Image (cartoon, rainbow, N blue to C red):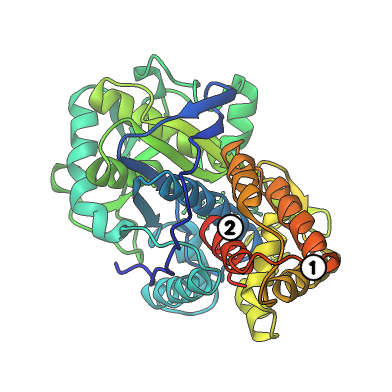
Amino acid sequence: MHAWPASEVPALPGKGRDLQIHDTATQGTISLAPGPVARIYVCGITPYDATHIGHAATYNAFDLVQRVWLDTKRQVHYVQNVTDVDDPLLERALRDNLDWTELAERETALFREDMTALRMLPPQHYIGAVEAIPGIVPLVERLRDAGAAYELDGDVYFSVESDPNFGKVSNLDAEAMRLLSAERGGDPDRAGKKNPLDPMLWMAARPGEPSWDGGSLGPGRPGWHIECVAIALDHLGMTFDIQGGGSDLAFPHHEMGASHAQVLTGEFPMAKAYVHAGMVALHGEKMSKSKGNLVFVSALRRAGVDPAAIRLALLSHHYRADWEWTDEVLAEAVARLERWRAAVSRPDGIAADALVEEVRAALANDLDAPAALAAVDRWVELQIATDGDDESAPGLVSRTVDALLGVAL
Ligand code: 5CA
Ligand code: ZN
């Protein structure tokens, strides 16, 4: 699949700092010092509805990770998937009397537009589940041949008991795992499973549903977790720097993915850091396609909201916080954008070298975007109140805000 166009990232004077980031698996902040090419896998959308502010907030977090790494003069190898075949997509297509491929293509196209408008850097490899199937089948066969998978009425399940490290990504107790499994695509109550938590690796073809050649597995379609493992291992290999997504992916998705990879490679963890963004709510409840309490990025854009203001609204919350989208959040971001633009439109101003370092320090400290905004706010206030004569300052601030925060002034 093609991704979307990259906005240019201006180079800043000096060099950025290495990222300290919270890792869900070790439940602490870790210091990540990737090699010259940093490797990140971010779980992509299931394209059955438009991009909402919750999605955008999560992708914003991982866009900041890339910007920090680029500022340390590293290259970034970024991979993202599109879950372009899965139950929710097929169910929505059926409900709306649409062809499921058309629905997936339409919503993926809209996602690309939204990401472009928000200046999110694109992945180098943007891979659909469907196009990954030829790589998924042999992995499921290997898991089965290693005794880590078993068949149930033609479907193939992964046995969580085959992984000695199972549970070490999300650190949840058995009861919490069972509840979340039922909520998030698992089937803990299906009779005949070895362990209720065992996730499906390969679903045998169902009447009226799409299916693909599964070699010795028979015709069917892939499970969700193996999709991301196959794509990640194919394009990044083992022990890449970050696997990212919203906090609702820690269990079961990233836990199961780590387990699949552990059995396939004998290594743990698949990613050096498991990084999870908080959930954005609307009217007191997590924004979710299934509940329908959504604010769409595309709807805001159509209403004339500057994407840079949307981006500032996302940045005004720490990525790990759960927060609520309100009209005030957006209004504050619109006002901030105006103030910042007025400040950098002056021909000269207050020296900004210290500001560059403050923004760098804030982001390197577990992506503290609110602290980065506060630092820019302080410069903007001084700039408006005082008569500085540094001609390079407004340009340097614009470039800093663009390079590190993805906001075009
Ligand atoms: N296709 C899978 C990942 S492989 C999936 O979870 N797709 S999704 O469309 O449901 O979600 C895409 C990303 O947005 C995930 O990282 C998810 O955790 C995140 N996300 C979904 N809802 C919210 C929300 N309300 N707030 C923050 N992030 C969210
Ligand atoms: Zn995923």
Mark 2 surroundings: few (<14), some (14-19) or many (≥20) residues within 10 A: many
| Label drawn at residue 405 | 2
| Quadrant housing residue 140 | top left
- Which residue is more in the foreground, 363 or 238? 363
Observer-nearest of 116 and 201: 116
Disc 1 residue type (three-letter): Asp
| Residue 191 visible somewhere in the drawing | no
Q: Residue at x 29, y 47 (%)?
A: 231
Q: Above or below — where is 5 with respect to 254?
A: below
Q: Nearer the viewer, residue 119 or 24?
A: 119
Residue 212: quadrant of the picture: bottom left
Q: Report helix, strand or loop for mark 1.
A: loop
Real-space Cα separation, disc 1 to disc 2, in angstroms: 26 Å
The residue type indicated by label 2 comes to: Leu
Q: Is residue 374 left or right of residue 254?
A: right
Residue 282 coordinates in the image, percent (x, y) = 78, 60
Relative image position of residue 306 (x, y in whole percent): 66, 78
Q: Is residue 179 above or below residue 119?
A: above
Quadrant containing the N terminus in the rendered view: bottom left
Residue that badge 1 annotates: 387
- Looking at the rendered image, the disc whose residue lies closer to the viewer, 1 or 2, is 1
Query: Compared with residue 51, is residue 80 higher up or lower down, i.e. above or below?
Result: above
Q: Position of residue 82 (x, y in %)?
A: 39, 59
Q: Which quadrant of the rendered structure holds the C terminus?
A: bottom right
From the top left corner, tell me how far across and down residue 72 is, in percent: 42, 43
- Name the residue: 42% across, 71% down: 104
Residue 365 can be seen in this image: yes
Whether 107 is drawn above or below 39: the answer is below
Secondary structure state at the residue bearing disc 2: helix
Tell me which numbered mark, 1 or 2, is placed earlier along the sequence.
1
Residue at position x 54%, y 36% in the image: 250
Residue at 37% in and 58% down = 123
